[in-house]
Image (spheres, rainbow, N blue to C red):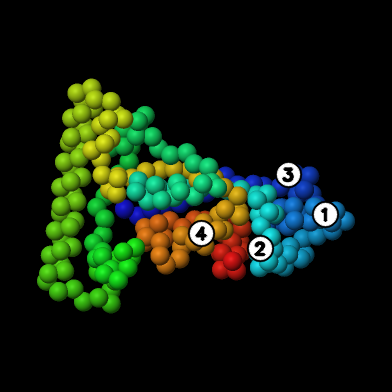
Amino acid sequence: MKSTVKLISYSKPAPELEKEGIDDCEQLVAYAARVSNPSNQSNTKTSSKLLDYLVTHKHWSPFEMASACLEITTTRDIARQILRHRSFSFQEFSQRYADPVKELQMSPREARLQDPKNRQNSIEIETDPSIQLDAAKQELITSWRRKQIGLINQSKDVYEWAINNGIAKEQARAVLPEGLVESRLYMNGTLRSWIHYVELRSAHGTQKEHQEVAIKCGEVLTEIFPNFNKYTKLI
């Protein structure tokens, strides 16, 4: 399953500030940073230079004056990793309230091998075009996919049987594989939190599926904060 990310909401300057030329998220952060210099607070010509300085010297508080909320669709096990970032606020699809089999997808995962030198790393064999696959590897990929599809079908059957026989959703959900069932959540945080999250989770050492989510978050956030990805590299 390919994760998706889309923008839901973000901080915008009030109409009064827009009249002064403060018309986007970056200008809003610069405006807040100049709170102690009111005579120069509406200066937009040097905003980009100011923000570069703030990030380089780790003056983060102005970046807490603007926020963004993104909708993330990914597998439930990756959502568990995302929820560990407690500077954010979250709202997630509830399997106690809604039927995930009807409302969400279940998809098999790609085959990756365990890295024998690093327990937190995996080795791609299915999606890396530089790797020549022998018959054994091809069979491994095919078998891995077939077994996952079998598990998906079986878990759906058991879940639907449970629901049809009056078992509560909060109990029936226990049979659904966390890594194969989709989840959808809203993730809201300040630009400071987003910069640190994307910088950390798009780097090597993060599980591939979570890396992909973080990279997509960075791409979406550049729509409202054009220099966003530059700041993740200045940390």
Q: In the image, what residue type sits under mark 3?
A: Ala
**Residue 97 image offset from top left, x and y in percent:** 37, 29
Q: Secondary structure at mark 1?
A: loop
**Residue 224 image offset from top left, x and y in percent:** 60, 55
13 vs 205, left or right, is right
On residue 36, the disc is 1
Mark 2 vs mark 4: which is more N-terminal? 2
On residue 58, the disc is 2
On residue 68, the disc is none
**Residue 116 image offset from top left, x and y in percent:** 26, 69
Q: Quadrant of residue 168?
A: top left
**Label 2 with label 3: CB-CB less than 8 Å:** no
**Residue 47 in view here:** yes
Q: In the image, what residue type sits under mark 1?
A: Ser
Mark 2 vs mark 3: which is more N-terminal? 3
Identity of the residue drawn at 77% across and 60% down: 44
How dense is the environment of label 3, judged by Cα within 10 Å: few (below 14), some, or many (20 and up)? few
Q: Secondary structure at mark 2?
A: loop
Mark 1 vs mark 2: which is more N-terminal? 1
Q: Quadrant of residue 192?
A: bottom right
Quadrant where the C terminus sits is: bottom right
Marks 1/2: CA–CA distance: 18 Å
Q: Secondary structure at mark 4?
A: helix
Q: In the image, what residue type sits under mark 2?
A: Lys
Marks 2/3: CA–CA distance: 27 Å
Query: Which residue is under mark 4?
Result: 198
On residue 14, the disc is 3
